[in-house]
Every structure is written in structure tokens, then in C-alpha cells.
Image (tube, rainbow, N blue to C red):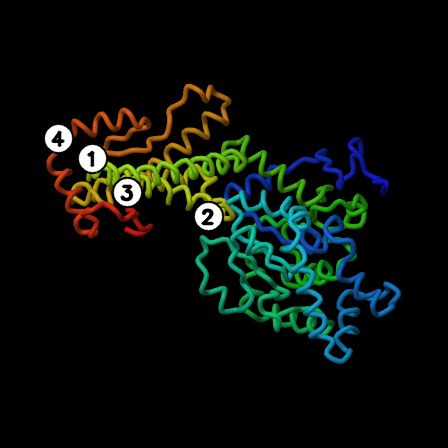
Amino acid sequence: MIEDKHNEKCLCAFCGNNNFEIPNDIIDAIKRENLIIFAGAGISTEGKNVYKTTLYTEINDELEENYDNTFPQLMTKYCNQPNGRRKLINRINERFDYYKAFPEVDNVMKMFFSPLSDIYSIKDIITTNWDRQFEEKCNCIPIVYDKDVSLIDDKKRKVYKIHGSIDNVGTLIMTEDDYEKCYSELNKNLIGSKLKELLSRKTVVFIGYSLEDDDFKKIWEFIDEKLGELKPHFYIVSPDKSMREKLSDKNVTIINTLGSNFIEKIRKQLIDDNYLLDSDILYSIAADLYYLCLKVHRDTNNLIKEKKEPLLIYSILYQDGLIHSLERILARKTSGEYLNPNFIFNSISTYSDMLKKYLKSGNVFDGAYIAGYIHAMDYIFYLYNVIYNKEDIENCEKIYLYYLPPKCGYNNLEEFENDLKTYKTKKYITIAKKIIKDMGNDNYELEIHHLPFL
């Protein structure tokens, strides 16, 4: 058994030490959508707690060097071999493929990326990393080329990949020549201008860099050159306790912890401030309700085949609305948008206005679907508050699973079937029969579904 030098009593950054403060400036910047994350390899595949060795170490040992090269110098030596650049790109791809094959490795990186994805108001990220972590885990749109800057919606979450992306291997910045060309172009291209704007007017937090990191040195030179005395106060998150002393002459605040500890503590504070919903609660509710609605939907389709009751079609359409609403909440998990209470309220309001228009025009087919779509959002927010506030869940309202137009919802099948027997609104009975006929389903043998379109 290998002895671990860290333990539960250890207070170092690597053991989850939370004995650090989050500056109010950072929290305020997040709430104003004014925070930039500048991310290095330490929060991704090159973190000390991810792989046994770094890419630098592997290449150094293969070339039998003495650890006295900078990263770009070492990569230059490797690329100078026959087919060296191609071999290096293959090595990088192999490292990235490895974490995808082993969830245990990937889960270490998720400790940073998952809480970051929850914080919906962090819209701009700058990174020197080549991998696809931000795209895959935080729903970021990559900015690699100048033309990307002008084509992307500002409301979307973006990652500026200033050292290229593994998706475009020709963009990778690895060697000394690459670095020289990269920072020369940043001095004059559109991405460089955008970086200057972001760094000068927003609150910036560096995470995943060390002072020995060549990427960090180059970035700092770029910032000094471009911003000079106008350079704002920056924050650096690092487990290296000596950083405060090393950067004592810089206009920075050092937060001594791991990037994952830092982001998770911010997430929890935003939840406590009621700015952010707790993803652990919300997505668990959504998943449980999703599987419940799928089952009820199958049962209702079987029921309409058995009873040949056209009015059941409204419940089937309504249940499709429930299912698609819950599917979207789960599918948009990496964007964090449904953790924003205002986003949910605005979505409910928009669809409620739409429902009124559909019902007024007599379109009860789509109206039943929209009613389900709205109720899923409304109910999930209601149940979230019950659980978050530790109220008695046994006595809370149940989700409405059945529907009769124009606005009758039921959470109990027996009650629904009783009302079904006495339902006399001829208009909606006629429409239900017409819908069945238009579907070519007079014998009720086909399953009925509403596609996720209006």
C-alpha cells in the first residue's frame, strides 16, 4: 500500500482546504456578468492530481533531457525529429482520449468544470489549453480564429483558445516559433483586441497556472505591454503558498487553494445568496420526474388503445410537453441556464403567453403540449423550494400528469378518469376525434407523440 502524505487533518490546498475567503469583488463581478476566468493546464489534463506524469515530463524523459528546458524549447526539440510534430500531436490526442476512457480520471477534472458550468453568468473564458473540456463540460463555444469573434452571440458562453484547439491541430501553439508567432499575431489580430478589451474592463481570475509556467509568463508580458499602467487588479488562484511573496510587486491578490475548491466555494455562496439554484437538487428532481413522465406516457398510450377514448389524446400531448421540458432542462445542464431563477420565470411567462394565443385560436393540439411544457418548469421550481427549504415533502402537491382542455390538470388517475366520464364540452370532443382521424389512427393502434416543435 502506498502511503499518502495527505490526510483528513491536512490543511493544504490539495486536501480540500477551505480556509480562504472569496473577495466580494469576485462575487459582485459574477452577478454583473463581469468575471473572466483565465485558465491554464493545472485545471485540466496537466493537473498534478490527474495523470501520473505531465506531457512535459513524458517528452523530457523520452528525449533524455535534464528538465532545464522551457516547455516551448522542449517541444521544439521533439518536433525537430523526423515527423516530430505529427508524433507530438498523436501523443497529445492519446492523453485526451485516455481521460474519456476512464471516468475516474475524468471525474477529477469535473471537480472544477462541473461547478463552473453551474455558474451561468460566467460568459467569457480565456485559456491556453488545447483540450475540449470547456466545450464538453461548460457548453462553451470555442473562439480560435478571428472570424469566430464576430460570428458568436455575446449572450453565449465562450472560450477564447489563444493557443489553439485539438479540433484544429494546425492551430496548436507548442514550439518556440509557435509562441513567437502567436503573441505577434495577438498584438494585431481581432482576438488580441478582444482580449485587451476583456482584460481591461472586467474582473479577471487566473486559475491553473504557476509562476514557472511559460504560458503564464507570456501572458503576463502581453498584459504588461498592452495595458501598462492601466492594468487592473487581478486575482490568481494557486495552491502555491510562495506565490504571494513572488508576486508582491504586482497588482494581484493571491487566493491560496486549488481551482476546484475555489469554484465550488463560489457556487455554494451563490446558492446561499439565492442567486443560483443548487444543481444537485434541481437535476435530481428533473431526472426523477422525467422517468415518471415517460412511464405515465407509455401507460396513457396503452390506455387510449384499450378504451378508444379520443379525449385521452390531450393527456398524451400534455405528457409530451412535460417530457420535452424535462429533457431540455437535463440537456442544457452544462449551460447552467436553468439554475437561473429568472430564466425559469421568463420561460414560464413566455410560454404562458403563447398558450393563451394557441387556445384563443382554437389550437388545443399544441395548447395541450404547451400546458405540459409550462407545468414541468413550474412544478420543478416548486418542488425545488420544498426540498431546499427542508419542508415536508410528503404533504407537497404532486405533479399534474393528466390534462383536459382548456386548463384542467390532474395528479390522480382515478380523479381524471371520473372527470373523463362526465366531460361534456362538445367542442373539444370534436377536435379530439378530428386529431385522431387526421393522424390516420382511427383504430387507435398507433402510438401518439407530439414532436418538440411548434
Q: Is residue 160 left or right of residue 424?
A: right
Q: Is residue 41 visible?
A: yes
Mark 3 nearby-residue class (10 Å; few <14, some 14–19, many ≥20): many
For the point 16% across and 41% down, the residue is: 360
> At 60% across and 37% down in the image, what residue appears?
24
Q: Secondary structure at mark 2?
A: helix
Tally the marks.
4
Q: Is residue 409 above or below residue 125?
A: above
Q: Position of residue 146 (x, y in %)?
A: 52, 69
* Badge number at residue 28: none
Label 3 – label 2 distance at C-alpha = 21 Å
- Mark 4: which amino acid? Lys
- In this rendering, the label closer to the viewer, 2 or 4: 4
Going from N to C along the chain, the mark reached first, 4 or 1, is: 1
Disc number for residue 424? 4
> Dot 3 lies on which element?
helix
Residue topped by disc 1: 406
Quote the CA–CA distance across marks 4 and 1: 13 Å
Q: Position of residue 60 (x, y in %)?
A: 82, 65
- Please, what is the three-letter code of the amino acid marked with disc 3? Leu
Q: Which residue is mark 3?
A: 317
For the residues marked 3 and 1, what is the alpha-carbon distance in whole angstroms?
A: 13 Å
Residues tagged 2 and 1 counted as in contact (Cβ below 8 A): no
Q: Residues within 10 Å of mark 1 (few under 14, many from 20)?
A: some
Check the picture and name the quadrant holding the N terminus.
top right
Q: Which residue is mark 2?
A: 331
Marks 3, 2: nearer the viewer: 3
Closer mark to the observer between disc 3 and disc 1: 3
